[in-house]
Amino acid sequence: MKSCCKEASDRGEDTLDAPQNTDEKAGWLTRLKHKWQVRNILQVVLILCTFALGGSACGYIGRRLMHVIGPDHKALWVIIYVLMVTILWPACVLIISIPLGQFRFFTRYLKKLGNRILGRKPAPNKE
């Protein structure tokens, strides 16, 4: 029997209702805070806003550029749009992150994402 369960049973508490670890009690914002290794919940909210605004801006700019390019064939339109959005998204997110104060987080995030896509091993933590 685990020590936390043994202690709870010694106190006469029901061990089935007690969470097994503290992560089960933590909210999703707190879990994101730990996963992203940021200081506070406000920073998590700003990061989520940056993702939302950057993605929306990317879609809007991509549609506008597609009207200029204007391929007639629907399949070609989709292929070009997906490639364009894939290239535009990191730039949009970085630009949106500057006024929201999350530029440092997103430079690290995009570097890590690029390394995963290219199959590189992550660099050791300097911090």
Image (cartoon, grey):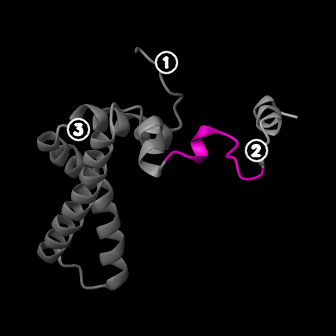
Q: Earlier in the sequence, mark 1 or mark 2?
A: 2
Give me the C-alpha separation between circle 1 and circle 3.
Answer: 22 Å
Lateral position of residue 102 relative to residue 13, left or right:
left
17 inside magenta stretch: yes
Give the amino acid at mark 1: Pro
Q: Secondary structure at mark 2?
A: loop
The residue carrying mark 1 is 124
The residue carrying mark 3 is 102
Residue at 11% of width from left, 73% of height from top?
A: 68
In x, y percent, where is residue 65?
A: 15, 68
Q: Which residues are magenta?
A: 16-26
Quarter-of-image position of residue 9: top right
Residue at 17% of width from left, 48% of height from top?
A: 96
In x, y percent, where is residue 79?
A: 36, 71
Within 10 Å of disc 2 (Cα), the crowding (few <14, some 14-19, many 20+) is few
Main SS class of the magenta portion in the image: loop
Residue 72 against residue 124 in the figure, above or below: below
Quarter-of-image position of residue 1: top right
The residue carrying mark 2 is 13
In x, y percent, where is residue 126?
A: 41, 14
Residue 79 against residue 72 in the figure, above or below: above
